[in-house]
Image (cartoon, grey):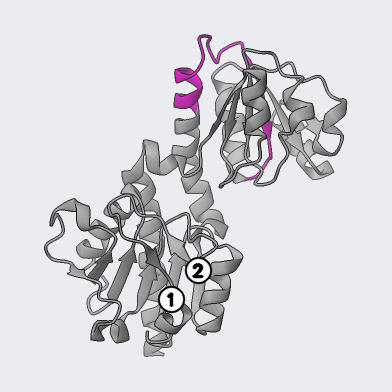
Amino acid sequence: MLTGFHVAVIGGDARQIEIIRRLHEWDAQVYLAGFDQLNGSFTECIDLDFDGFHVNSLDAIILPISGTDENGCVDGIFTNRTLCLQTEWLKKTPSHCQIYSGIANETLKKIVHDADRRLIPLMNRDDVAIYNSIPTVEGTIMMAIQHTDFTIHGSKVVIFGLGRVGMSLARAFDQLGAKVTVGVRSHSGAARVHEMGLDFIDMGKISSYDMNYDYLINTVPSPVVNASIIKKLPSHALILDLASKPGGSDFRYAEKRGIKAILLPGLPGLVAPKTAGRIVANVICKELQELDRKAEE
């Protein structure tokens, strides 16, 4: 239980709705900013007044999974307000206040560091990323089916990256009957793909490979799906880019070639926000209970 905890939820998508519900189940006092279009759905919550006295009581601040932009502002699909995090405001919170975000760019890191608070990027945690790969994989399969006129079974799929999401994707598409190839950068990655019974290609020598694939799925958050790769793809190919914005694909060149390329950051929040929100909420609850335990010690 989180009785006596004061938690602010600032901006975000449908995943935050489940987080808010969970916090209430655990008896936390919740403050909201960026949910004014929900028409009072959470009457037991308190609107967060950034200049109000309750800022001094906050034990935790929960930001969207996407974190902030380069100006420290957060996205919120339930508001038209611009919500930005500032160092001076964070300094008004108690010294033990923890800031949770899915991912953290350099701007967010600096804001929190300068305020001498603790930042917890949830997607850096293995448990969150692995749990989160489940709705990510289901959403990727859904998009693959919706945007093609052929079956996954029997198709050729190449997946860039053998991280926590890439590995789950490789297994799922293999089980659906696709011929799966995985782009790796290390000998250990190649060994893992071989152990899984799949093919691999060396990302360091990617330009030397034939790219005759029906699906190209990218999980690497850097520009790896460039023009030299896209020009080798067949015209019917579909590129699904799961990397965080701006993705790792040359979308301009793909459009020029007539190849459909779709950027899909935050896919779990689109296809399974309840499950994705529950994953994040459970981790935050455990973290806050640990904070409470340390305070007692």
**Image quarter (top left, top right, bottom left or bottom right) of the C terminus:** bottom left
- The three-letter amino acid code for the residue at tag 2 is Ile
Residue 278 on the magenta span:
no
Q: Which of marks 1 and 2 is nearer the N terminus?
A: 1
Residue that label 2 marks? 120
In this view, the residue in front, 147 or 268, is: 147
**On screen, 254 above or below 122?**
above
Marks 1 and 2: CB-CB under 8 Å? yes
**On screen, 123 above or below 52?**
above
Label 1 and label 2: CA atoms lie apart by 7 Å
Q: Give the range drawn in magenta.
A: 141-163
**Image quarter (top left, top right, bottom left or bottom right) of the N terminus:** bottom left
Q: Is residue 60 left or right of residue 71?
A: left
Crowding at mark 2 (Cα within 10 Å: few <14, some 14-19, many 20+): some
**On screen, 167 above or below 126?**
above
Give the x, y percent position of residue 40.
13, 57
Q: Is residue 259 left or right of residue 95?
A: right
Give the x, y percent position of residue 128.
49, 54
Q: What element carries label 1?
A: strand
Q: Which mark is residue 296?
A: none
Q: Residue 98 carries which label?
A: 1
The reply to whether residue 294 is in sight is yes
Rendered residue at 34%/64% (across/down): 10
